């Protein structure tokens, strides 16, 4: 077992979120969102809500909409434990420019979480350099 830490070296900054205030008193407003069923007009609880996936473009081979319950989405998310799973290696020559289009991340071993991570990470990195491969 090996533990690593992942750091974003550069990440774009975003504007602060909009804060709604009353026009006359300048007091903060509280947002309240309710979900209503289109067919019956009844208020939906969090258990009744569904996630809707739409096809990427019209006329595709996918169904027009796919409704998935929250329980089904949670079950899919719990299939694997959280973390990074190394699936394999590819030759460095197969790495294309569009694979590097996003910001870079710095990965380093985390000795505090799992002892021996630095040695395992160094061995993995040395093997990748010798094989001229990327993970």
Image (spheres, rainbow, N blue to C red):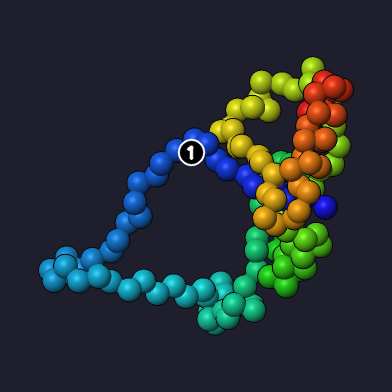
Q: Image quarter for residue 7?
A: top right
Q: Image quarter for residue 120?
A: top right
**Rendering coords of residue 21 (x, y %):** 23, 66
As helix, strand or loop, the secondary structure at mark 1 comes to loop
The C terminus sits in image quarter: top right
Q: Nearer the viewer, residue 28 or 116?
A: 116
Q: Nearer the viewer, residue 122 or 105?
A: 122
Residue 65 visible to the viewer: no
Can you identify the residue that label 1 sits on?
A: 11
**Rendering coords of residue 44 (x, y %):** 57, 79
Q: Residue at x 73, y 58 (%)?
A: 82
Q: Residue at x 65, y 69 (%)?
A: 50
Q: Residue at x 75, y 22 (%)?
A: 95
User: Considering only vertical position in the picture, is 101 above or below 43?
Assistant: above
Residue 59 visible to the viewer: yes
Q: Image quarter for residue 23?
A: bottom left
Q: Residue at x 55, y 40 (%)?
A: 8
- Taking the view exactly as shown, the residue that stands out farthest to the left is 24
Within 10 angstroms of label 1, few (less than 14), some, or many (20 or more) residues?
A: few
Q: Nearer the viewer, residue 119 or 50?
A: 119
**Rendering coords of residue 41 (x, y %):** 53, 79
In the drawing, does residue 71 fall left or right of residue 44? right
User: Considering only vertical position in the picture, is 50 above or below 106?
Assistant: below
Q: Nearer the viewer, residue 62 or 27?
A: 27
**Rendering coords of residue 133 (x, y %):** 82, 25
């Amino acid at each position: 077992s090996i533990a690593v830490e992942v750091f974003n070296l550069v990440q774009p900054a975003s504007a602060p979120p909009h804060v709604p205030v009353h026009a006359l008193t300048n007091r903060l407003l509280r947002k309240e969102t309710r979900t209503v069923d289109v067919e019956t007009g009844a208020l939906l609880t969090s258990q009744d809500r569904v996630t809707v996936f739409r096809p990427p473009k019209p006329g595709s081979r996918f169904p027009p909409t796919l409704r998935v319950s929250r329980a089904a989405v949670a079950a899919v998310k719990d299939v694997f434990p959280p973390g990074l799973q190394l699936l394999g290696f590819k030759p460095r020559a197969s790495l294309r420019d569009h694979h590097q289009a996003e910001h870079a991340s710095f990965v380093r071993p985390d000795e505090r979480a799992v002892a021996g991570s630095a040695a395992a990470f160094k061995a993995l990195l040395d093997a990748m350099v010798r094989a001229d491969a990327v993970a």
